[in-house]
Image: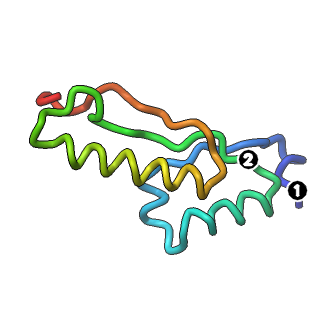
Amino acid sequence: MRTSRAGFAAVEIFADDLEAFPGSARDVRRLTEALDLEVVVLQPLRDYVGAPAERRAGANESARRLLENMNQLGCRLLLACSATDAAT
């Protein structure tokens, strides 16, 4: 069944779900393409803006990983949410 017949054209991928998935981001892309779906956004990049110096390297690494996953998913949009940590 083509998923588009059910009314769906695209999906958003939550980064925590992607990490828990037993395959790679490319595997997710293959699955979504097989269902005739586009991955339109990967979310969220948290606590990046305003990260204190001692957390900046970790924040940069998280952003780099998400950008790599976006490339593998074929998606062009990253949702960067408001800071969730009081230190940022």
Q: Choose between 67 and 29: the one closer to the eye.
A: 67
Q: In this view, does 7 lie to the left or right of 62?
A: right
Q: What residue is shown at x 67% (from left), y 60% (from top)?
A: 29
Where is residue 64 drawn, in percent x and y? 39, 49
Residue annotated with mark 1: 2
Instruction: Assess whether mark 1 and mark 2 are in contact (beta carbons under 8 angstroms).
Output: no
Q: In this view, does 50 lie to the left or right of 21?
A: left
Q: Quadrant of residue 36?
A: bottom right
Q: Pointer 2: residues within 10 angstroms few (<14), some, or many (20+)? A: some
Q: Pointer 1: residues within 10 angstroms few (<14), some, or many (20+)? A: few
Residue annotated with mark 2: 38
Secondary structure type for disc 2: strand
Between disc 2 and disc 1, the foreground one is 2
Q: What residue is shown at x 37% (from left), y 45% (from top)?
A: 63
Q: Earlier in the sequence, mark 2 or mark 1?
A: 1
Q: Is residue 9 above or below residue 51?
A: below
Secondary structure type for disc 1: loop
Q: In which quarter of the image is residue 19?
A: bottom left
Mark 2 → mark 1, Cα distance in angstroms: 13 Å
Q: What residue is shown at x 38% (from left), y 29% (from top)?
A: 81
Q: What residue is shown at x 38% (from left), y 39% (from top)?
A: 45
Q: Choose between 2 and 68: the one closer to the eye.
A: 68
Q: Is residue 45 above or below residue 71?
A: above
The amino acid type found where label 2 is placed reads Glu
The amino acid type found where label 1 is placed reads Arg
Where is residue 28 drawn, in percent x and y? 62, 63
Where is residue 38 drawn, in percent x and y? 73, 47
Q: In this view, does 64 lie to the left or right of 86?
A: right
Quarter occupied by the C terminus: top left
